[in-house]
Structures are given as C-alpha cells and as structure tokens.
Amino acid sequence: MSPQPVDTLKGFAVTFRQLFNKPITVQYPEYVRPVYPRFRGRHRLHLHENGLEKCVGCSLCAAACPADCIRVVAAENEPDNRVSAGERYARIYEINMSRCIFCGYCELACPFDAITLGNEFEISEYSRDDLIYTKDVLLAEPIKTVPVASKEEFDTPDPYYKLHS
Amino acid sequence: MAVASERSSGEAIYEGSRIPSPIPSVLLVPEELRLGEDILEVNFGPNHPSTHGVLRLVVELDGETVVGLRAVIGYLHTGFEKSMESKTWWKAIPYAPRMDYLSFQANELAFVMAIEKLLGIEVPPKATWMRMLLCELNRVHSHLVWLGTSALELGAISPFWYTFRERDRVLDLFEMVGGVRMHTRYFQVGGLAEDIPRGFFDECRKFVEVMPGAVDQYEQLLDQNEIWLRRTKGVGLLSAEDALALGQSGPVLRGSGVDWDLRRAAPYLAYDQVEFDVPVKQNGDVWDRYKVHMDEMRESTRIVDQALEGMPGGPWIVDDRKVVLPPREELHTSMESLIHHFKLVTEGFRVPEGEVYLAVESPRGEFGCYLCSDGGPKPWRVRFRAPSFVALEATATLMRESLIADMIAAVGSLDTVMGECDR
C-alpha cells in the first residue's frame, strides 16, 4: 500500500481524454430528449369520432387507483343531450395529480380505452389546486407536448382492436 | 455456506470476532472515558449529504476517535407494509418498488414471486428470463449510484459524472420497457405487464457492449488514486465471523470473505441456466467492498448478455383468468372476459390461505418478502426483510477504534438505502 503520486495522474488521463469526446448532456429546457412511446405521463380522456365521450362513468379507474386520486361521479345520459356513448356518463371526473403515482393502473382498468396516460411530463404548477385536473382539462389537448420516439421502433405493435374500433 | 479458508497473500488484517456477546448495534462509551470531560457528542445527520438519505448517527468523540455510536433510524418511515395490507394484492404491487428506490425491480420481484408461490402459478419462460435480465440491469444501476455517491463523499467528484452516464442508459432501457424510469410495476402476478418492445434487444445489446469498458474506466479513475486508496484500504473492518453473526448479506458479506449468494445458493428465476461468478474478497474493508461492487457489475453484464441470447419466445404472462387481467381485445367481444376484468379490478383475486417467505438477492443482499394470507383479496400481513436495515446494525462494529473521517467511508460502503431500511 504505497501508491506513487504518478499513479494518481493516471486517473487524470481518463478525464483529459473525455475532453475530446462529444458531450452526452443536452441543454434541457431548449432541447427535450424524445421519450419512449410507452412513457407514462399526463392523463388524457378520449372522445369517439362522433364527438361523444368514451368514458361511461363506471368508476373502474377509481377502483383500480392505488393512490386513490381519481373521483368519478356518474349521471344518466339525457336522450336529447347525449354526452357519452353509454347509458351513463361521468358528470364529474377529477384526477388529483399531486397524489398520482403514474402506475398506469387506470389505463389498464378502463374497459373502453377512455383514459390513457399520455407522454407529457412537465406538469408542475404553482398551486396545489391547479393540480386537480377536471374533465375539461383532461379532454383538452395538452398545451405542452413532448417529442416521442418512433412507436414502430420502440413499442409492440398495436393490437387489432385499437386500429379498427 | 463456507467461509473462505485462505486469505489473500497472508496479509489478513485481523481474524476472529471483535464483537462481544450479546451483539451490540450501538457502540457504548467506556466507563472511564465517560467520567472525563473530553467526550464530544455530535449529531451526524439526519440531513447530512453523506448519510445516504436520512440516517442520523449520534457519534461520541474522544478527540477524533469514535468511541460511541448510535444509529437512529425512522426518519423515512412511510408505513409501506401497513399500506399494502389495506390494498388488494394487485394494487399493492406498485408499492413494493417504492421502498428501495435504487433496486425497485428486485423489490417488485420478491413481492410478485411471493404471491405467485402462494397461488402456485407457473410463470412462462419468457417472463422468467426477462425478469432476470431486468433485475441484473437494476443491480448495475444500483451499484453505479452507490459508486458515484460513495466516491463523491470521499472527495472524488469525477466518477459521479461517469457512473451517471451509464446509469442513464439503464434507466432509458427501463423507460422503454416499463413506461417509467424508476418504479415500473412491470412485473405482474403471472408474468410481465406487457410484451417486450421492439428495439429493446438492440438497445440493450449496445449497453452490454459499452458497460465492461465503462467499469474499466471507473477503475482507472479510482484504483490508483492515492486519496481513494488511503481512505478505503483497512478502513471499516468487518471480519467474516462478525459479518455472519450480524446477519449481513450481499456485497458486505462477500467483501468479508464469505462466499454466499442467493442466486447460486438457492437459484430462482433462470439463474441456474446462466454462467456467472460470485466475486468474493477477503479483507472486509471498504476497499474490498468496493471491489466486490465493481466485479458484480461485470458479472451482471455477463448475465444480461446471456439473457439476451437465451431469451425464449412465447407468451409473457400466464393465461389464468382468475388472476391475470384478460387480454384487452377480448373486453370488446367477450362478456365473460369483461366480467372477469371488473371482478379482478374491483374485488381483486383471492389468494389461498397460508404464509410464505421468499428471498431474492437484491443489489444490497438478501431481500425477503414474508406474506400471510387469510384467503381474502387483501394480504393479511406483509413484511420485508430489508438488507439495508441489517447492514446498518454493523455500523457499531465497523467503527470500532476508528476515526470520525473514516465513518463516511465505512457507512457509505454498507450501501444502505434509508427508504428500504425504514419502510
């Protein structure tokens, strides 16, 4: 155990050589690295092509949520004012994003693919109240979007029913 | 279990035990010193950057020598075990990886495999191999964080940047497979949550090619650095006997010369079908623990390489409608599947009455999961054997007759994660 001070310099050779390599860091807020297609971020509620909501207010997402952050209050559809494709619709649909752990169980539980987890991750707010997302927020297109890597390259193929429903 | 008989080149620093019986987990100040006025009590932590979380060490100093030491834990107690008991088996799965936030896959694996053992489910080979692959990637990830932060605490900031470069690649792989970078809940009861994505094998192979060179690079940075050598060699000594008496496992035990690894001693997953060595070092100091970590990263990369080669095809989750969620396309066509789906999500599956203990080799050592089921849809008792908690019990023995400055190196080398320790 008598190392020579010269040996210590060998470590510096590594750091010196690194000077000539391309940096691996990116300038984050200006440049956002594409996330992989499976990345679970901000939730989205979806509409059918005819404009009706896919969500029928069955509360299965709320039942599946390990963090208990989803609140659904269902109401009957009126014949002259249909909101969803089913008998009932979600009159109130709230997700408390400050409690959400992004496990994606709501997405797995939903039998109608009404709720999915999108890829957006920059969702911090200045107030906790703003983190309770209502149905309008979840139905709207996210204001900020992130680049996503190619689904063909980094995900399994979409199942048949998703392409033809 | 065999204690390695020969010690390296006859320069064993000490043999036998230094701990009296009963084994103390605190170091008490000798009576003659306590009567003097020279003892200084220092609170080290809980908010100290080099305590690996919120560990508080109450240190009593005589000059610069540590004469008294007491580890105070519980600052990160989150009640995971109790929370899991109030959730159904399925909903408890995302809780498990959040305990030890550096070896999430291993935690998830222990919990999921324990449920599978109670249920008596056979997991498809593809899921078994993929679980093994991800667990080994996780071991690399955990060791990289350990190496980076431990070196940082001893004054070497460069290795931190180098290790986090490779760590990010591992996390990218997790993101591609499981959807999030850390707590993936990718292991489900019966197999995997989703199929392996296209492109995973290519990306993972690229990582496997890079990793051995990267480990060499870390060693070039540290191995001959005089400061690193002087701060690690002969510091924080733990003999094989002491390590066994204190119930140590993982790199701490192997750094002390005990050849014990659950992956080889009680093979789970497909560890009996891959080739790997278990690195064992003899002296039980910080340097040997460091070397064990470095060699384990190489061995894990070897296992990942073999897992990529030998990955079988077929289904990724077992087809058992009473336990596993039905395939999503069936929800649109089959009423029976929809009923199963609703029942599994709301009520959860029932697990036969009984109790089970299952241990896996997490990056920190033996991570055990004890489950007790009363036949209902929720676990009646969940308990984890946390290797970090056990490792912390060795602090008092490690710190015998050593200096305060060596405490950082010694406690850091135990590789504790307080989230797992306090649970």
Image: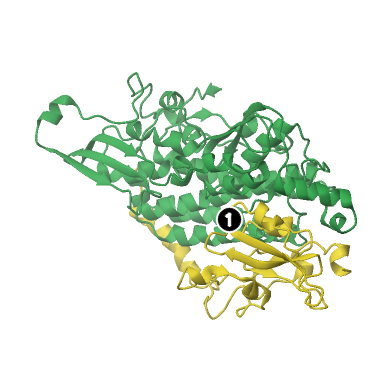
Chain colours: A yellow, B green
- Residue B60, compared with residue A124, is above or below; it is above
**Disc 1 residue type (three-letter):** Met
Q: Can residue A24 be spotted in the picture?
A: yes
Q: Which residue is mark 1?
A: B182
How far across and how far down the image is residue A51, in percent? 79, 78
Q: Is label 1 in a helix, a strand or a loop? A: loop
Give neighbour class at mark 1: few <14, some 14-19, many 20+ (Cα, 10 Å): some
Q: Quadrant of the C terminus of chain A?
A: bottom right
Q: Chain of mark 1?
A: B
Which residue sits at x=63%, y=54%?
Answer: A65
Please indicate whether residue B23 sits to the left or right of residue B374 in the image: left
How far across and how far down the image is residue A127, in percent? 46, 71
How far across and how far down the image is residue A93, in percent? 64, 66
Please indicate whether residue A161 sits to the left or right of residue A116 in the image: right
Which residue sits at x=30%, y=42%?
Answer: B57
- Residue A125, compared with residue B227, is above or below; it is below
Which residue sits at x=85%, y=49%?
Answer: B337
Q: Can residue A38 be spotted in the picture?
A: no
